[in-house]
Amino acid sequence: LSSDRIQRLNSIGIIWDLRNQSIGFSLKVKNRFDELCAFKAQNGHCNVSTKDVRNKSLGQWVKKQRQLYKKNALDPDRIQQLNSIGFIWDLRNQSK
């Protein structure tokens, strides 16, 4: 796979799972957006902490979305999707 293709797959939440030795590696796609929507419904916000033990992988995904956004490497459809649920891109500029 080209590095561009890998980056695009990562931007939509692809999880590269190397634990399945019988087939070398497999791709598992989890819909992180749906997980984030559920998190927001329960908590009232999208700011998932990477330190939250129950939601650590979701928190890492949220962090990655912000990193990709800052690098202008996030798909515009993903940006629109996250904006639609009130995703905050820069926590430093968040008004309370």
Image (tube, rainbow, N blue to C red):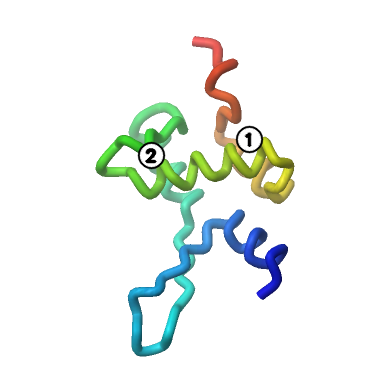
**37 and 73: which is toward the camera:** 73
Q: Are marks 1 and 2 in contact (CB under 8 Å)?
A: no
Q: What residue did someone put label 1 on?
A: 83
**48 and 35: which is toward the camera:** 48
The residue at the point 59 percent across, 16 percent down is: 93
Above or below: residue 34 compared with residue 2: above
Quarter where residue 44 is shown = top left
> Viewed as shown, does residue 35 lie left or right of 52?
right
Q: Amino acid at mark 2?
A: Phe
Q: Which numbered dot is residue 92? A: none
How packed mark 2 is, by other alpha carbons closer than 10 Å (few <14, some 14-19, many 20 or more), is some
> Viewed as shown, does residue 72 lie left or right of 22?
right
Q: How many marks?
A: 2
> Viewed as shown, does residue 49 lie left or right of 67?
left
The residue at the point 61 percent across, 63 percent down is: 9
C-alpha span from label 1 to label 2: 15 Å
SS category of the residue bearing label 1? helix
Q: Position of residue 41 (x, y in %)?
A: 39, 35
Q: What residue did someone put label 2 on?
A: 39
The residue at the point 71 percent across, 47 percent down is: 73
Q: Amino acid at mark 1?
A: Asn
SS category of the residue bearing label 2? helix
